[in-house]
Image (spheres, rainbow, N blue to C red):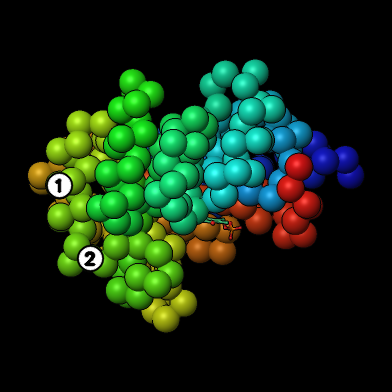
Amino acid sequence: MNRRDELKANLEEVEERIAKACESAGRPRAEVMLLAVTKTWPASDVEILYELGLRNFAENRDQEAGEKVGQLRHLEEARWHMVGRLQRNKARSVVEWAGQVDSVDSVRLAEALARAAHAKGRTLDVLLQVSIDGDVSRGGVAIADVGELAGVITRSGDLILRGAMTVAPLTMKPSQAFQALASVVSGLRDDHPTATQVSAGMSGDLEDAISHGSTCVRVGTALLGGRRLTSP
Ligand SMILES: *Cc1c(COP(=O)(O)O)cnc(C)c1O
């Protein structure tokens, strides 16, 4: 099978899983965005997925993403998310390619991104990355600190708080983590009406996430495959 046929078959399978999960949850399909996580896969794969209709893509390393997005400027409707841990000194670089940063987990990072967006004369959409089990060494802000960080983001004027994301910890049932994230976002919405996105669920647990209110599933392996090519 050529790569296009392979990606087309994978995409059909993922779309079917999402559609079924939405149906079981009694939710409209349009409520859930499919975010293709293309880290480690070449720009040519992104071109194929774009041709197949996808518009939202994610990367987890600034340098790899910057190079890839640079090769894909002709995909005018593509929108890129940063989903990986981000150091403050990469803030200027990330605003060059990302429309949204899904992994904001500290005040210092938020401030650096706000400055970088401001210097470019644009706003930047962000999600809080939440650590549901409080093990912040794996990235994410503890639930107790969500309110403070959200306040810094909103007050900056340069960042727009769109919601929150989590990676389900290995130490608890994913459904528990997804439920906790949904309740974090519903709490945020009271003070921050733009915070509507719940980014949860990956290749292995997207059904579970959709049944607990996810509005964005981040899918890598199920779309692109498990054996990663070397980065371009
Ligand atoms: C790689 C990655 C994904 C995709 O995971 P798969 O299991 O390959 O679907 C989702 N979210 C983040 C933050 C990732 O780094």
Q: Residues within 10 Å of mark 2 (few under 14, many from 20)?
A: some
Mark 2 = which residue? Answer: 143
Name the amino acid type tagged 1: Gly
Q: Quadrant of ligand 1?
A: bottom right
Residue 50 is at least partly visible in this image: yes
Mark 1 = which residue? Answer: 151
Residue at coordinates 69% horizontally, 27% vertically from top-left? Answer: 71
Residue farthest toward the front in the current orientation of the protein = 89
Q: What percent of the width, then of the height, locates residue 10?
A: 70, 47
Query: Is disc 2's CB within 8 Å of ligand 1?
Result: no
Residue at coordinates 46% horizontally, 77% vertically from top-left? Answer: 170
In the rendered structure, the answer to whether residue 8 lies left or right of residue 112 reads right
Q: Residues within 10 Å of mark 1 (few under 14, many from 20)?
A: some
Name the amino acid type tagged 2: Ile
Q: What percent of the width, then of the height, locates residue 209?
A: 41, 59
Residue at coordinates 57% horizontally, 49% vertically from top-left? Answer: 61
In the rendered structure, the answer to whether residue 108 lies left or right of residue 209 reads left
Give yes or no for contact between labels 2 and 1 (Cβ–Cβ under 8 Å). no
Q: Quadrant of the N terminus?
A: top right
